Amino acid sequence: MRSLAVVTVLLSALACSPSGGSAAPTPAARPPVQDAGAPGIGDRDFPLDGNGGYDVAHYGLKLGYDPGRRFLTGTATVQASAKQALSRFNLDLAGLTVDQVSVDGAKATFDRKGDELTIVPAAPIADGARFTTVITYSGRPQPVKDSSNLGTYGFIPTQDGAFVTCEPNGAKTWFPANDHPADKARFDFEITVPKGLVALANGEMSRPAATSGGKTTYHWRERHPMATYLATMTLGKFELRQGRTPAGIPNLAAADPRFRSALDRLHTNTGKITDYWATVFGPYPFSSTGGVVDDFPAGYALENQTKPMYGGFDPDESIVAHELAHQWFGNSLTIKRWRDLWLNEGFATYAEWLWSEHSGRSTAETIFAGFRARPASDPMWAYPPGKARPGDLFNESVYTRGGMTLHALRKAVGDQVFFKLVKEWATTNRHRHVSTEQFVALAEKRSGKQLDSLFDAWLFQPRRPA
Ligand code: TRP
Ligand code: ZN
């Protein structure tokens, strides 16, 4: 408080000094535009991801893709509400050519710089107003090639279509987005592809597919809030298996013909595991479950909402358990800043251990003890999982040590409190945003224990917990 007061006094002294003095404003700095929305949503680790000043309620994405030319055409209708007066605002968009923008039906001007699309509506938007932006665009989408441990993500063209996995910020490679999990929205997709191909997006089909003039159009709707990184428009030749889980949730599995032999097992395991997680974590948060095996050799999986993607392999139960646990932890309960990523990956990793225990293989305790035995010099102990780092977001520590944190908590509070707590966490925060602080507070409240030092040692210290 005291140092803040000193700074304030200094600043006002500078502001009062006559121009021409030592405190003259730097001539290069452009004056800020009044009522401009910020170019980032406020995640200090990802300063340009997402945008400030508004909140998206709905994306309507009308998309066409030609795999031969690898060419995308799109019309994005973005419904949002202003959180401040807006003379201009940004969306995130990487590459592609914007042809036209309108706001509330009036032509708007726009500007591109890096991955920021700045839109200047014909008339300023009032604080609190709902407004609709329509962007028509086209081009050849380019995936993000990350130099750190992320590899390639975003819209990835394949032989017969596209493999679309966007965590953390690759949605902007195929649609103009407020591309940060702090702004979730509902989605409608209308995707047109050459006849013979299938387009798979999130949620359920809102109309039957229709073919005319050699093209097929698919309509998909995700009616629950979704973070942009979980959106997909995966395209290609697919075999489908449709049905319900034993408990009755619609379940759609899809596999590239090269992975035909994985289809039945994926469908069955997805049904069985979705239902089991509903008994552990509370009701399934979405209107359908499923999974997609494509032939793009990503070697990884992503928890795309309602349809996890498995890139180029026949997924075993463990990874299906991981991706389906994310439907609760990450997709329904969503982080507001990437630093809290252990709330996604630690929970999904711990779910793998719980699935192992449930299936009569190794118990979570055995798996935990195996990792616990790693020498103090192991790099996992130097990386505190509660502070996921922007250049190394998906470090093994965020997964494994994040999962270990939950097991340490389980041991400290006992099974009964632990499982009640996890279910309450997932149920009361359904479709909301969450933070590490909230989880710690709930754990303390439900256990009646002081857990600061446990969480501090497991999540925040750069060393192996004692
Ligand atoms: N969230 C994924 C998982 O652990 C991993 C992941 C991160 C990923 N970024 C990705 C997968 C990009 C595909 C594409 O399940
Ligand atoms: Zn994961």
Image (cartoon, rainbow, N blue to C red):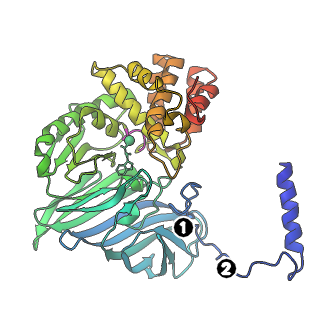
Residue 280 in view of the camera: yes
- Residue 260 horizontal/vertical position (percent): 11, 45
Q: Nearer the viewer, residue 131 or 56?
A: 56
Residue 336 in view of the camera: no
From what the image shows, is residue 199 above or below residue 357?
Answer: below
Which stretch is magenta?
A: 326-330
Q: Main secondary structure of the magenta part?
A: loop
- State the residue at coordinates (18%, 48%): 254
- Residue 346 horizontal/vertical position (percent): 45, 35
Identity, as a three-letter code, of the amino acid under mark 2: Arg
Q: Nearer the viewer, residue 155 or 108?
A: 155
As drawn, is 165 to the left or to the right of 89?
A: left
As drawn, is 282 to the left or to the right of 259?
A: right
From what the image shows, is residue 237 above or below residue 355?
Answer: below
In terms of secondary structure, where does tag 2 sit? loop
Residue corresponding to mark 1: 129
Instruction: Please report whichever mark, 1 or 2, sits nearer to the chain's N-terminal start.
Output: 2
From what the image shows, is residue 146 above or below residue 281?
Answer: below
Residue 30's disc is 2
- Depth-wise, is mark 1 or mark 2 nearer the camera? 2
